[in-house]
Amino acid sequence: MKPEPSPLLYPCGQAPEPGSVREIAPGVLWLRMPLPLSLDHINLWAVRDGDGWAIFDTGMHTPPTVDAWHALFGAGNPLGEGGPTRVFATHMHPDHVGMAGWLNREYGCELWMTRGEYMNCRVLVADTGREAPPEALNFYRRAGWDDGAIEHYRLRFGGYGKKMAPLPQSYRRLREGQRIRIGEHEWQVVIGSGHSPEHACFYSPELKLLISGDQVLPRISSNVSVHPTEPYGDPMGDWLESLERIKAAVPDDVLVLPAHDDPFRNLHARLDRLLGSHRRALGRLHKLLEEGPKRVVDLFGVLFARRVDAEVLLLATGETQANLNYLVQRGKATVSEDADGVAWYQSSPRS
């Protein structure tokens, strides 16, 4: 059976190399920075803002990214005229805000961010170098991790801030529905949640552009995880509701500027596919739970196409827990703990 053709269109051509730009709309530039990850790049966006440039997301704080920013802002280079005026961060992850403090100190540009993202980022940065707390270790034991996986997590804990320059100690708050004048055009803030607490997207009706961050990506679905700090949270519910709300708030005819992969058209088709994919996964999970009690680690195969190894165990556990919390909180599954504190999930008799 042939795979279903993608309904998305990619009209912007080849991505720019780090340190260079590609104009994709009047006064709107596409930048790309390297990442030291399996996902090896992040897209950033520069929007003409008076005499300078408003920057959307920043890349991780690594030597190659510092070099790329120096190249962009140097005299006679693409962003050299006027330099950066302000930094807009879609959310708190290091590839999106890791260079915000460096840009702030080098060029004096203010950080704009939602309160939920800025404050959570401050908390996680403060964990850098700390030992893993007992609550976190118990969270993963409850999911069914063995001693080896727990020890691996314990040794890696506290690495969040290692690819981040120190954050600015103040910021300008972004809010849902806020309208911001950037250069000649107005941009509206559209908030999403699930992948992160209060993710900001930016919609320009005049330019018909949506800077989507990680909230809407063309080829992959962003991780939606429960974390040890809020073990009974419902990020999957937040995520699904956010996708529906973005579909209602932003028309289909925008060019979507995502954080990863290429700019694309047909936003609503992509939102429908994401919603459908997650709902089908929830259905498969619910059906498997009808067979009898399962731990979090027993359920990876029904949700993920790839084998879950040590590299992705943390993300897979968080997302599986998010799916389970969604079902439990809607009465479709129940959970009990055994004598070792391990959680077992099964389909609710009344579901």
Image: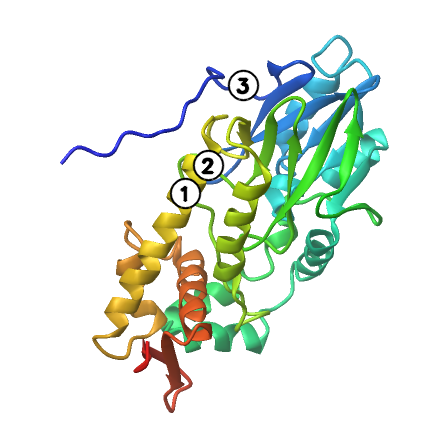
The residue at 69%/56% (across/down) is 125
What kind of residue is marked 3? Glu
The x, y position of residue 22, in whole percent, is 58, 15
Distance Cα–Cα, label 1 vs label 3: 32 Å
Tell me the quadrant of the picture where the C terminus can be found.
Answer: bottom left
The residue at 41%/36% (across/down) is 269
The residue at 44%/56% (across/down) is 315
The kind of secondary structure element at disc 3 is loop
Disc 3 crowd, CA 10 A, few/some/many (<14, 14-19, 20+) = some
Residue 48: quadrant of the picture: top right
Distance Cα–Cα, label 2 vs label 1: 6 Å
Query: Taking 229 as reference, is 246 above or below it?
Result: above
What kind of residue is marked 1? Asp
- Residue 99 shows in the view: no
Q: Are marks 2 and 1 in contact (CB under 8 Å)?
A: yes
The x, y position of residue 86, in whole percent, is 79, 32
Among the two numbered marks 2 and 3 on one chain, the one whose residue lies closer to the N terminus: 3
Mark number for residue 17?
Answer: 3
Left or right: residue 49 versus residue 319 is right
Mark number for residue 272?
Answer: 1
Residue 95: quadrant of the picture: top right
Instruction: Identify the residue position indicated by label 2 in the image.
Output: 268
